[in-house]
Image (cartoon, rainbow, N blue to C red):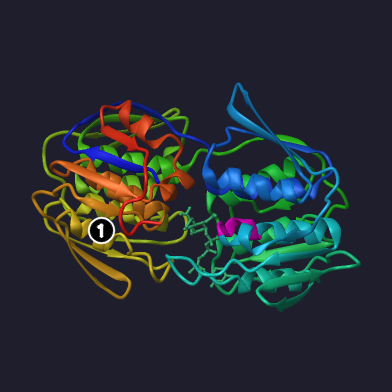
Amino acid sequence: MDRIAIEGGARLEGEIQISGAKNSALKLMAASLLTDECLRLTNMPRLADTRFLGRLLQRLGVSVIEGDGEDGAQTEFCAKDISSAFAPYDLVRQMRASFNVLGPLIARTGHAKVSLPGGCTIGARPVDLHLRSLEALGARIDLHEGYVYATAPRGLKGAEIEFPMVSVGATEHALLAAVLAEGQTVLRNSAKEPEIGDLALCLSAMGAKIEGIDTDTLTITGVSKLNGATWSVIPDRIETGTYAVAAAMAGGEVRLTKTRADFVQALLDKLEEAGATATATNDGVEIKRNGARLNAVDVTTEVFPGFATDLQAQFMALMTTAKGESVIRETIFENRFMHVPELMRLGADISVQGGEARVKGVEKLYGAQVMATDLRASVSLVIAGLVAEGETVVNRVYHLDRGFERLEEKLGACGAKVRRISGPPEDGEG
Ligand code: EPZ
């Protein structure tokens, strides 16, 4: 199993081109099930997760053709005929976003059998809100032996849905189902993450009628058929934020291009407060940090446009060597501090109580063997490794490969000493 080794101490200087957003691409891919014409997605990230969902779509009868175009990598998804409406456990368990095929399958074929995704390391992550919205749209849902059996023989019907809490996945799922439902659907207390706007605009390009995009109330007037389209995936705000934190950690000057500063404004404000400089440019953002040690600042994760939970681990890594004590509150997931014991192996001083971590900045981190536990936790260890004295080796790199395209190449191009070691698993790994 591959590992990533980082030799700490190098400043970062240069440019990193940001890829298309994983969490947008996955939902756009699910949208391809809604039409018998082809959906071509450009600026596609090539990641383990997108490959994985591509394989599930193929199992359902979708043809998936990868290529290259002016706007980077592209993939064409053609769901002319859906040959199966069954998403088995082994394919949904490995990647939760696979569950998003449920709504489109019901909308297109009137029935589906999709495995429940189960929990994951960052929390229980139930799908009750997804299922309640599909029921509100007229689907009959039965749960047996870990599977959702859904039917809507006479099609889905528009409904008024008020989400009791903000959920990115449930908003996207309801939107994916409602575009082909008969009549009007209103989704209140919807999530406003940029990936939802991207999905809504792509669906509109496919012929859907959606109002209120980027607000918390989406009004959808169902259409009987959607057409194909070509759509460019928005830039990955979490990859953007991750490299911004990496530059602030290592010091130097890094230009992040083909992205948008406004997608990560809450993070940039915190980086400035800590003493780094973040300047929006016409195609991204430039991060500078010269000399002085950063100051500790507090963060609380929130729904967009607040500080993203997917950047919490990275920011905590940054705070491990800041001057003073920083309080980091996680409010979105109940168990998203799995990186803490690993950061402590590098010499960080962190204590956790409930959803709050107190990080006392230390002068120095020291390289060690560490274990990746989930996607964002693993990249926080790479960030810490950028300044740790000696070598840090991050095991279980498959977590990183799920969501960061060519990470070692992108960081390496800016001078980081990062290399991938291919080889057999470490003791206890696997
Ligand atoms: C999406 O997950 C992202 N995943 C996550 O990124 C991200 O952390 C999260 O949104 C929040 O921004 C994808 O887009 C594939 P939620 P999602 O529904 O949709 C609870 C990464 O690293 N909830 O907004 O699953 C839930 O347990 C991943 O790329 C229910 O209780 O997040 C959580 O506490 C990790 N019932 C909260 O809501 C439900 O039916 C927010 O979850 C649904 C959610």
Dot 1, crowdedness within 10 Å: few (<14), some or many (≥20)? Answer: many
Residues drawn in magenta: 94-99
Which quadrant is the C terminus positioned in?
Answer: bottom left
Residue at 60% across / 21% down in the picture?
A: 70
Residue 356 image offset from top left, x and y in percent: 28, 70
Residue 364 image offset from top left, x and y in percent: 10, 48
Residue 266 image offset from top left, x and y in percent: 37, 50
Question: Is disc 1 placed on a helix, strand or loop?
Answer: helix
Q: Residue furthest top?
A: 70
| Position of residue 54 in the picture relative to residue 339 (left or right) | right
Kindly tell me whether residue 217 is visible in this rendering: no
Residue 92 image offset from top left, x and y in percent: 62, 60
Foreground pick, 185 / 420: 420
| Position of residue 256 in the picture relative to residue 272 (left or right) | right
Q: Is residue 267 above or below residue 109?
A: above
Kindly tell me whether residue 334 is visible in this rendering: yes
